[in-house]
């Protein structure tokens, strides 16, 4: 079964990749992704300075998903600039994920990291866990300003990782921003920000940062993820491929993302839970499902979702 994907002219050997999130921070973790069946190596979102992230406990797993307030722990962009050329040996696309604390930092990091030759660059506008900083993806003007300044500094396909939106007008406005900034691909969705889980036994929150508020991920957010993939596919399909993220635990989940309009899918919570073997398992499950259904490739499924007649 052909599981390859194409994103903005770059071929991925498999359409199933890691999300910028868990287990992609250190060189050892990135190398392990290189050895795995992930179709790409996606880095943790890199900031200007190295960050230890938010105080622990900052990650909580439950049967339907996860709540995290990691706070972008990462080694700082200079380290990823060293790592990227060394990861080329794996022969699969490298996506450098970039997160600034302000517009100047996005420019500085994206411009420099571009010169180190990742295959694609993702601008993360949607981390909900930086204390005192709102998610840029909910501020149209600030998003457009950042993307328009970064665009000419980057020679690779440039993508944007967005938060979930809950009303069509918001997706329409953001689609306009992405078109005007000449963005090449879209990654939707980041975690559902500022969710709260309460332990009724202890009568307490389950993570320390932000008094317990954090980003919700995993199986429970799949319907929100699918809705955003579908909405952006309807708005942008001709111009920008989509990497779907949110709730992918099985090959069926990946199939649903492809049907909604994703060209590739990225796995976060389930990767953190299951480890590197998940890429092989999901590939096998998706391959079997496509075969049963008579598809000859993952690409043949993209956007094929059927709606009901009136
Ligand atoms: C985090 O490090 O807080 C999660 C990453 C993100 O939400 O972009």
Image (tube, rainbow, N blue to C red):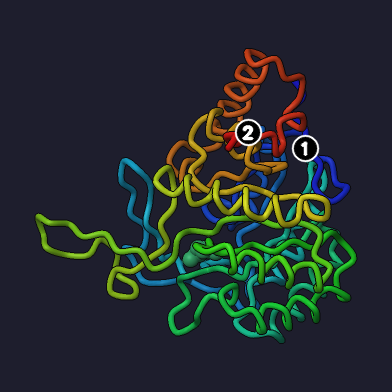
Query: Mark 2 sits on what residue?
Result: 306
Judge by depth and name the residue closer to the eye, 6 or 41. Answer: 6
Residue 162 occupies quadrant: bottom right
Q: Position of residue 103 (x, y in %)?
A: 69, 84
Query: Mark 1 sits on what residue?
Result: 5
Disc 1 from disc 2: Cα separation: 22 Å
Looking at this rendering, what residue extends furthest in the front direction? 310
Which mark lies nearer to you, 1 or 2? 2
Judge by depth and name the residue closer to the eye, 129 or 75. Answer: 129
Q: Residue at x 39, y 46 (%)?
A: 220
Residue 155 occupies quadrant: bottom right
The quarter of the picture where the N terminus appears is top right
CB of mark 1 within 8 Å of CB of mark 2? no
Q: Residue at x 55, y 46 (%)?
A: 226
In the structure shown, which secondary structural element does the residue marked by tag 1 occupy?
A: strand
Q: Residue at x 66, y 71 (%)?
A: 173
Image height of 14 relative to 73, above or below: above
The mark that comes first in sequence, 1 or 2, is 1
């Amino acid at each position: 079964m052909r599981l390859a994907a194409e994103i903005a002219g770059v071929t991925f050997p498999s359409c199933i990749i890691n999300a910028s999130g868990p287990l992609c921070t250190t060189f050892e973790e990135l190398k392990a992704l290189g050895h795995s069946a992930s179709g790409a190596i996606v880095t943790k979102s890199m900031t200007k300075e190295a960050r230890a992230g938010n105080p622990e406990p900052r990650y909580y797993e439950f049967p339907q998903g996860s709540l995290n307030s990691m706070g972008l722990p990462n080694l700082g962009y200079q380290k990823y600039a060293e790592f990227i050329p060394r990861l080329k040996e794996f022969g699969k696309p490298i996506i450098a994920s970039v997160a600034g604390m302000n517009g100047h930092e996005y420019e500085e990091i994206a411009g420099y990291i571009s010169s180190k030759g990742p295959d694609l660059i993702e601008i993360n506008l949607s981390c909900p866990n930086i204390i005192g900083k709102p998610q840029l993806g909910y501020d149209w003007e600030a998003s457009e300003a950042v993307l328009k300044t970064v665009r000419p500094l980057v020679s690779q396909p440039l993508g944007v990782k967005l938060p979930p939106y809950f009303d069509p007008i918001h997706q329409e406005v953001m689609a306009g921003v992405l078109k005007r900034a000449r963005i090449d691909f879209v990654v939707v969705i980041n975690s559902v920000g500022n969710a709260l889980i309460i332990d009724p036994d202890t009568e307490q929150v389950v993570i320390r940062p932000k008094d317990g508020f954090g980003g919700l991920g995993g199986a429970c957010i799949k319907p929100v993820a699918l809705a955003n993939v579908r909405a952006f596919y309807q708005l942008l399909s001709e111009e920008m491929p989509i990497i779907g993220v949110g709730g992918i635990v099985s090959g069926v989940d990946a199939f649903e993302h492809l049907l909604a309009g994703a060209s590739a899918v990225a796995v976060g919570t389930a990767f953190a839970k299951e480890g590197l073997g998940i890429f092989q398992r999901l590939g096998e499950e998706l391959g079997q499902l496509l075969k049963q259904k008579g598809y000859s490739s993952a690409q043949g499924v993209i956007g094929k979702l059927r709606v009901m007649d009136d």
